[in-house]
Amino acid sequence: MKKLINSPDDVLAEALKGVDAADENVRVDHTHRVIFRAEPTRPGKVAVISGGGSGHEPLHSGFVGVGMLDAACAGQVFTSPTPDQILAATVGTDAGAGVLHVVKNYTGDVMNFEMAAELAAEQGIRVETVVVADDVAVEDSLYTAGRRGVGLTVLLEKIVGAAAEEGRDLDAVVEVANKVTGHGRSMGMALTSCTVPANGKPSFDLPEGEMEIGIGIHGEPGRHREKIAPAAEIAERLVTPILAELTELDSAGADEGVIAMVNGMGATPLLELYLMYGEIARLLEGAGITVARNLVGNYITSLDMAGCSLTLVRADAELLRLWDAPVSTPGLRWGM
């Protein structure tokens, strides 16, 4: 294992010290391992928090800031944050208008966020939850009952964060969140495995010359393995199953094209990600689908895994307006 670490046991704690030192716009609670905005939540604003296992950066800590999250809970690598962490984030961001929990659909995440919401309710804080389950690859997998929550989480945090920033109440923010989850789907693939520092070896074996289609962000098995193919064929493997589902969704109002994200798994160069985006854009154009907005880069990773994922969200005018709204975080920044 070759990694820029001191000790596998201290990776998260030391990384959070680096986050604290690098960005004056966030504040790190090192006891609870929660990243907050430096400024407290504006009175009357709905707070939006999320979290999950570390190793997916910039998700979630890199999306704390104006226009996105109010706080993010950092679990150990590929391990759900604890209810105490989530409660600290919830209490620490509530400004009287309630808190939205954005939760990826993994059993530990769902359970721990649910427990934290119950504890917050005992303190008089209203909490609503949106569960992201956008992976079309498989129905059930390691760590999940139902579909996994993957790339759509990034787009949802941006859109919902904008809705909260402009002063919508909690019910209205939840309505936007449900619209995004209802109109977004994702699919990923891997060229290599990833190595969790505490394990010191690849999480799974992927022989030279093979790729896994439908991989999860923790290395969970996908749909199948096959020989590595040209990028054009890989793009088709990702686009086809997503479009098969998007075309079946209720399209009421969603007539403004799609928001498309080509995401790197951590070790794939931008050169290759842009090449993949070109192939995907060609396929979407051929299917008569307009790409209204796009995002290309590393946004929800799997440590040092090589590969990529595609997320598509059917957009209406409201979603595009919220997407375009100003955002200022380490991971996304525009309009400010």
Image (spheres, rainbow, N blue to C red):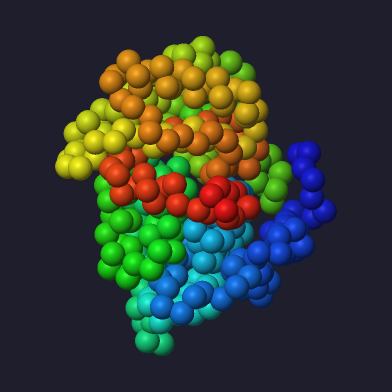
Of residues 90 and 228, the one drawn nearer to the viewer in this rendering = 90
Of residues 201 and 98, the one drawn nearer to the viewer in this rendering = 98
At x 36%, y 44%, the residue is 320
Q: Quadrant of residue 106?
A: bottom left
Of residues 194 and 161, the one drawn nearer to the viewer in this rendering = 161
- Counting from the top left corner in percent of width and height, residue 126 is at 35, 78
At x 19%, y 39%, the residue is 251
Question: Taking the image as drawn, is residue 215 in sight?
Answer: no
Count of marks, rendered view: 0
Q: Residue furthest bottom?
A: 123
Relative to 269, say whether 218 is above or below: below
Q: Residue furthest right?
A: 6
At x 40%, y 71%, the residue is 46
Q: Is 290 displayed left or right of 29 in the figure?
A: left
- Counting from the top left corner in percent of width and height, residue 109 is at 44, 60
Q: Is 229 displayed left or right of 5 in the figure?
A: left
- Counting from the top left corner in percent of width and height, residue 204 is at 57, 35
Q: Residue furthest front?
A: 336
Quadrant where the N terminus sits is top right
Q: Is 77 displayed left or right of 14 in the figure?
A: left
At x 46%, y 34%, the residue is 294
- Counting from the top left corner in percent of width and height, residue 61 is at 59, 57
Relative to 87, say whether 292 is above or below: above
Question: Taking the image as drawn, is residue 254 in sight?
Answer: yes
